[in-house]
Image (cartoon, grey):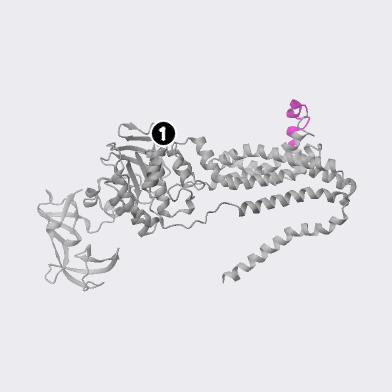
Amino acid sequence: MKRTAARPLLWLAALLAVYLCAPFVASIPQVGAADWHGVDWTTTLSAVAVSAGSASVASLVILLGGVPLGYLLARSHSRKAALLGFVVQLPLALPPLTSGVLLLFLLGPYSWVGQLTGGALTDSFAGIVLAETFVAAPFLIIAARSAFTAVDPMFEDVAATLGHRAGSRFFRVTLPVAWPAISAGLALAWLRAFGEFGATVMVAYHPYSLPVYTYVVFGGQGLPAMMPLLLPTLAIAIVCAALSIYSRNGRASSSAELVNGDDADDNTHAPPVLDEDDRRLSIVLRKHLGGLDLDIEWAPQTRRLAIIGTSGSGKSLTLRLIAGLEAGQRSTVLLGETRLDDLPPEERRIGYMPQDYGLFPHMTVARQLAFPLSADAASARLWVDQLGLSTLLGRLPHELSFGQRQRVALARALTQHSQLLLFDEPFAALDTPRRRRLQQSLRALQREISAVTVIVTHDPDEAALLADEVLLIEHGRVLQAGAVSEVFERPASMRVAQLLGLHNVGQGRVVDANRVELGGELCLNAAGNVELSIGQTVMWRLPALAITPSDEGLFEGMVDGIELRRGERYARLKILGVAFDILSDDPRLKSDTSHRFSIDANKLTIWTI
């Protein structure tokens, strides 16, 4: 099926390839008819030198201005930028002669520029360069814009948190990542400039460039005299094609066999001794972004923190505000007595790890670890040893497993003595076994370092493992904040319970001084929990172990279904209209069967809301 589907595409590709190659093949028999004796080699070589030199100068000018312009067009989404992007592409749509006429309006001897320069910009080498620049620039600008658009802005964000200012981020991260595509655009621009005829002949007939001289010879002496002049152009085309093939085949691609880095994670040991630090994080954040109004105040008392919420709840935005990568209507970020909100991200000395760890694709592991502006060589060596990275220093990110990437990102953040580590769902893209191993590895590391760690996640189990305090948010608002044990044991609302994935939790009503209606017709005694008032609305929780199947049980319930969770068998029950989940291996409990159950009301927890 796949071969049949691909065959039409293959034929179409072959047809176009044959057409593109045919003119070169057709020119071979004509070589013998060329007038080799009448060639003015001095003028020919001069024309070749003029074309090569002017194309090189034009390409340099295009490179110096086109790369920043491409970056501007890629990063700006304003209407002015869109209009500018349209205008700079117009030379591609214009006939070359029309481009030359337009340039004469600007540079010609009767224009104000021409009068100011004394006509030096026409019929001169400078005129050729200007004509070629105008016609060839769009090739590089379009390539640069596409290249910069493809570079994830996250790389610049990570570089900022590692201490690098805007200029350093551009030249050391963004430009190197985009350079392969930009260099291809630069090669196209050079070739376009070298072969430019229409605009050049209008602006600068003299000195002869190779295309203009070829036209002159053809007009005066015919095809046989012009044939030898094709040789320099064909030779340059062959050289460019050869360089392209060599560049493609010669690209560095390590074939080193990857070890199972994720298995090695279990052997990770953090340094036994690190300085103690009692600094804590405190934030007040206000931000309006599209349809989201973020309003968060949080002053946790521990160092291991987690932010839980659904997609679009503002979790990542909160992290970016803490890092200084976003500006809010109000942003107060305190780390101990230090106000971070007064500092740009490059001066906050924080470690920021996005979902895919933010490793720069063009840097080896060794360069990644040396990249933080305040990287400490001794600390880097320490973490290389402790995190098992010594055999990976020469590898690029795409040559690493997920576990290895995480360890490299951790080491990079820790080499600059970061006191605040921000993790944006770092395990979201991993399969369950690998995710569990890496979570355990990070938890072990958290116990040893003094930095405050903030984990953004939608997984409550992950939050419970990696944090001592959690913040639950939805639509930019705080639902509940507090110690993990408190939040999981006493959610502030049913929505919080849903976000935490809790079972056997509900909202009830006090029907008597010591009796609570859990829902439907199920009522249990709640004496000794809290002081209750009749009619009061409360939250309740009943541990799964408090419900057991028993032939002498007082309550009859229906098994709605059986589920396996991490290899454990759970039964979903409904007792007097209230849903419960219990852990049970009792083979009698099957879907759509009725049984009697005992409920230990002494294990019922009630709290007010």
Residue 105 inside the magenta-drawn segment: yes
Vertical arrangement, residue 192 with respect to residue 577, above or below = above
Query: Residue 196 location, x and y as percent?
Result: 75, 44
State the image coordinates of residue 281 (x, y, percent, origin top left). Answer: 31, 38
Let me know if residue 373 is in the magenta part.
Answer: no
Viewer can see residue 264: yes
> In the image, is residue 145 above or below residue 248?
above
Where is residue 466? Give x, y as percent.
Answer: 30, 49
Of residues 133 and 190, which is closer to you in this image? 190
In the rendered image, which residue does mark 1 sit on? 347
Q: Is residue 101 above or below residue 522?
A: above
Is residue 410 in sight in this rendering?
no
Residue nearest the observer in this picture, 336 or 117: 336
The one nearer the camera, 438 or 197, is: 438
Q: Can you tell which quarter of the image residue 515 is in? A: bottom left
**Span shown in magenta:** 103-118
